[in-house]
Each structure stands twice: as structure tokens, then as C-alpha cells.
Image: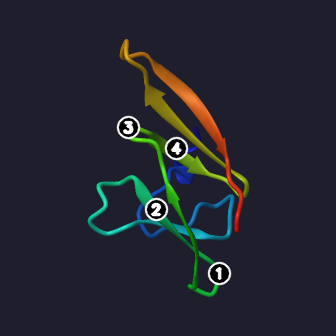
């Protein structure tokens, strides 16, 4: 994982134009996606326990632990409304 691609609240991922922000007071599962002009484009509800590593233009990469506490890399396709 490239350290500059790690998402942080309110920062843009270098690999995609939208800005991803955690929804205030939503315990980290709900993210809001803002376009280049700052308009809300959509929201995303992420699985509980997902540690996001990268937001791409059409995907999200992260790590998630299973019932045996083993970490798995996961990739989710992103589709905009």
C-alpha cells in the first residue's frame, strides 16, 4: 500500500477526484462522497470493521478480520448513482 493513498478524513485520494469524508457522528461506517466542485455526490455504508486502505476511481481496498481474527484484503467495486 502506498502511504499517500491512505484515506484520511477530508482529503482526496490521489487516484480519484472525489473527496471522501466520514459522516459526522456515524461511527466511521458511513462516508460521504463529494465531487470536485464540493457537491455531495453520494454516500457509502461500509462493512463494520473494515479498515480502508485506498479509495480508487472505481474501487475501495481495505482489510477486514474474520471470526478467527485473520486479516483479509478486500476489494469493493464502486458505482456512482
**Which disc, if any, is residue 36?**
1
Q: Are marks 4 and 1 in contact (CB under 8 Å)?
A: no
First reached walking from the N terminus: tag 4 or tag 2: 2
Q: Left or right of 28: which side holds 34?
A: right
Q: Which of marks 1 and 3 is in front?
A: 3
Q: Which residue is located at x 29 percent, y 55 percent?
A: 27
First reached walking from the N terminus: tag 1 or tag 3: 1
Report helix, strand or loop for mark 1.
Answer: loop
Q: Which residue is located at x 39 percent, y 52 percent?
A: 29
Q: Which of marks 3 and 4 is in front?
A: 3
Q: Between residues 50 and 14, which one lies in front from this camera angle? A: 50
Which residue is the extreme one toward the top?
A: 68
**Which residue is disc 4 drawn over?**
53
Q: Are marks 3 and 4 in contact (CB under 8 Å)?
A: no
Q: Which residue is located at x 70 percent, y 65 percent?
A: 80
For the C terminus, the quadrant is bottom right
Q: Between residues 4 and 23, which one lies in front from this camera angle? A: 23
* Residue 38 percent coordinates (x, y): 56, 85
**CA distance for labels 1 and 3:** 29 Å
**Which residue is disc 3 drawn over?**
49
Report helix, strand or loop for mark 4.
Answer: strand
Q: Which of marks 4 and 2 is in front?
A: 2
Q: Left or right of 56: which side holds 24?
A: left
Q: Left or right of 65: which side holds 16?
A: right
For the N terminus, the quadrant is top right
**CA distance for labels 4 and 2:** 14 Å
**CA distance for labels 2 and 3:** 14 Å
**CA distance for labels 4 and 1:** 21 Å
**Which disc, if any, is residue 67?**
none
**CA distance for labels 2 and 1:** 16 Å
**Which disc, if any, is residue 31?**
2
Amino acid at each position: 500500500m502506498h502511504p499517500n493513498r491512505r484515506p484520511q478524513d477530508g482529503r482526496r485520494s490521489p487516484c480519484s477526484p472525489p473527496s471522501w469524508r466520514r459522516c459526522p457522528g456515524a461511527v466511521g461506517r458511513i462516508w460521504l462522497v463529494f465531487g470536485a466542485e464540493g457537491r455531495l455526490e453520494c454516500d457509502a455504508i461500509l462493512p463494520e470493521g473494515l479498515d480502508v486502505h485506498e479509495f480508487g476511481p472505481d474501487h475501495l481496498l481495505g482489510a477486514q478480520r474474520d471470526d478467527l481474527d485473520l486479516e483479509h484484503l478486500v476489494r469493493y467495486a464502486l458505482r456512482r448513482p
